[in-house]
Image (tube, helix red, strand yellow):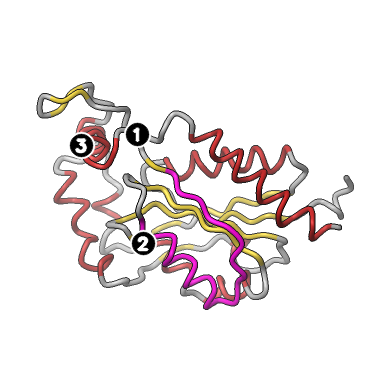
Amino acid sequence: MSEEMRPRVLIVYYTLTKQSGRVVDAMTKELEARGCDVTKALIEFTDQRWVPTLSRFPMERPVAQIATVLPAQMRHKTGEIRIPSEAQAGDYDLVLIASPTWWFRTCIPIRSYLESPAAKAVLDGKPFATVSVSRRYFSINLREQRKLAEQDGGRFVDKTHFVAAGGQVKSMLSWLGYMKHGEAQSRAMGLKMPPPNLQPDFEQQAKTFADGLVDKVLQPAAA
C-alpha cells in the first residue's frame, strides 16, 4: 500500500500512571501492522493547581494528594493543557480518544482537549472511537467522551473499556500501595494484591478492537 493510500489515524490520549499509554501503544502496534499511518498525541497536563501534587512519585499520601483534583473533576471542570500540533489540525481518517477514568468520568486533561477549538478542528466530520481505562466495568467516562466529541462534530463509530486487574477494591488498594511505595505490593490489609495495572489480556483486547476499527471503518472508507 502506498503512503498516499494508507489510512491516517490520530490517537489523542492522556496517561498519569502509564496504563492508558500501554493501551495506546498496543493499539498503535496493531493499527500499523494493518497498514495504518498512526500519530500519537499525548496531552500534557500543565495546570499548576494540580500538577505539582499529582506528578510526585512515589506519593507520601496518595489518597490526599489525588483527592486535590476531586472537586473540579466532579464538576466537569477543565484545566490548562498543552496540545501537540498533531492534535490541533489534520486530515485524519479516524480519531481515537483514550482517557483514564477519574471518579467514573473523563479525566480533566482529555475533557479540556475535547472542549478546545483544537478538538473541533480535528473532529469535525470525522469518525471517532473512545477508549476508557478504569478499575471497574461501568463507567460514565465513555459516555462523556462521546458526548463531547459529537459536540465537536465527530461521528461516533465504536468504544472499548479496559479494566485494571483485581476488581474495583483490590485494584485500588494495589494501585495506592504502588503510588505510595514506588513498587508493587504483594499484600495490603492482610489481602493478597493483584498487580497494580491492566488485566493480563489487555494487549489482545487492544488488538481485537484495532482490527475491528480497520475492518469496519477504515477499509470500507478506502474502498
Q: Is residue 67 left or right of residue 151?
A: left
Which circle marks residue 61 in the picture? Answer: none
Q: CA distance from mark 2 to mark 3?
A: 22 Å
* Residue linked to disc 1: 165
Who is closer to the viewer here, 88 or 147? 147
Q: Relative to 36, does residue 184 appear above or below in the rendering?
A: above
Who is closer to the viewer here, 124 or 86? 124
Q: Which residues are magenta?
A: 139-162
Residue 112 is situated, as x and y percent measured from the top left of the image, at 42, 69
* Residue linked to disc 3: 173
Residue 201 is situated, as x and y percent measured from the top left of the image, at 48, 31
Mark 1 nearby-residue class (10 Å; few <14, some 14–19, many ≥20): many
Question: As shown in the figure, which amino acid type bears the numbered disc 1?
Answer: Ala
Q: Secondary structure at mark 3?
A: helix
Mark 3 nearby-residue class (10 Å; few <14, some 14–19, many ≥20): many
Question: As shown in the figure, which amino acid type bears the numbered disc 3?
Answer: Leu
Residue 221 drawn in magenta: no
Mark 2 or 3, closer to the camera: 2
* Residue linked to disc 2: 140
Q: Secondary structure at mark 1?
A: loop
Q: CA distance from mark 3 to mark 1?
A: 11 Å
Q: Are marks 2 and 3 in contact (CB under 8 Å)?
A: no
Q: Is residue 46 visible?
A: no
Residue 177 is situated, as x and y percent measured from the top left of the image, at 20, 33
Q: Is residue 87 visible?
A: yes
